[in-house]
Amino acid sequence: MKHITCWLDFISPYAYLAFEKLPDALKGLSYQVDYRPVLFAGLLKHHGQLGPAEIRPKRDWTYRQVLWAAHANGIPMELPAGHPFNPLALLRLAVACGESGLANRYVCETLFRHVWRGGADAEDAARLQALQAQLQPRRDAASSEVKAELKANTEAAIAHGVFGVPTFEVDGRLFWGFDGLPMLRGYLDGAEWFAGGAWEAAAALPVRTSR
């Protein structure tokens, strides 16, 4: 049985799409998935990047492209009332529902669909209160313990080389993005390509210039 770590943030439409499609992508395999919420903004800050929604032309394309991808894959999706938004309340709630920085699939599904179905405001106080009542977290989402676990998750993701969400880690290899699911499946199926040296060679390509 393969162990997969899924690093995610509910702010990401690609994380939502990948989360919804993951069971189909892994059908027929023996696996365990650990869902670890991280602060995507923390990854961006560490790597000195802007998010897709912070670059106006890329923002427009991202929303169009994810809506098309959802349509093409039969995944219900509506953009929230505003995006980007502050996901900390959702991330902390996810962590508060679990232990050791993990969240189960039901909790993640509930939070992803809170954002990406219905077109409502992801930060609306009444909706967040309803989520609390529905999920009944084991711990106080505003506690220092929960905040520390979310921070630790983000720091661990960075230490593992994660730069974006969703990222799926298995056997020390990172598979990034919704469109990385077929590659993840290929690896888990034992595709010969992964034993041919191309994976390692890609990381060894020399840098000719930098800015």
Image: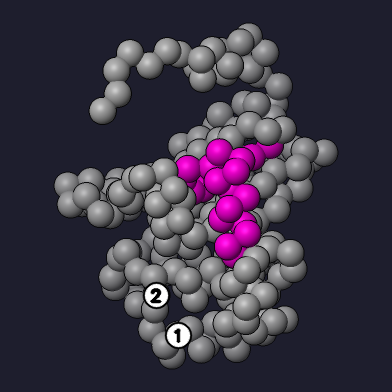
State whether residue 34 is above or below residue 82. above
What is the basis of the colouring in this image?
one colour
* Residue sitting farthest toward the right: 1
Quadrant of the rendered image containing residue 123: bottom left
**SS at mark 2 in the image:** loop
Residue corresponding to mark 2: 122
Q: Residue at x 36, y 45 (%)?
A: 48
The amino acid beneath tag 1 is Arg
Residue corresponding to mark 1: 127
Image quadrant in which the C terminus is located: top left
Whole-percent x and y of residue 66? 34, 49
State whether residue 172 is above or below residue 111. above
**Is there a contact, CB below 8 Å, between mark 1 and mark 2?**
yes
* Residue sitting farthest toward the top: 196
Of callouts 1 and 2, the N-terminal one? 2
Whole-percent x and y of residue 172? 68, 33
* Residue sitting farthest toward the left: 57
| First to last magenta residue range | 150-170
Relative to 96, 164 lies left or right: left
Relative to 13, 190 lies left or right: right
The Cα–Cα distance between marks 1 and 2, rounded to whole angstroms, is 8 Å
Relative to 70, 60 lies left or right: left
Q: Residue at x 75, y 42 (%)?
A: 3
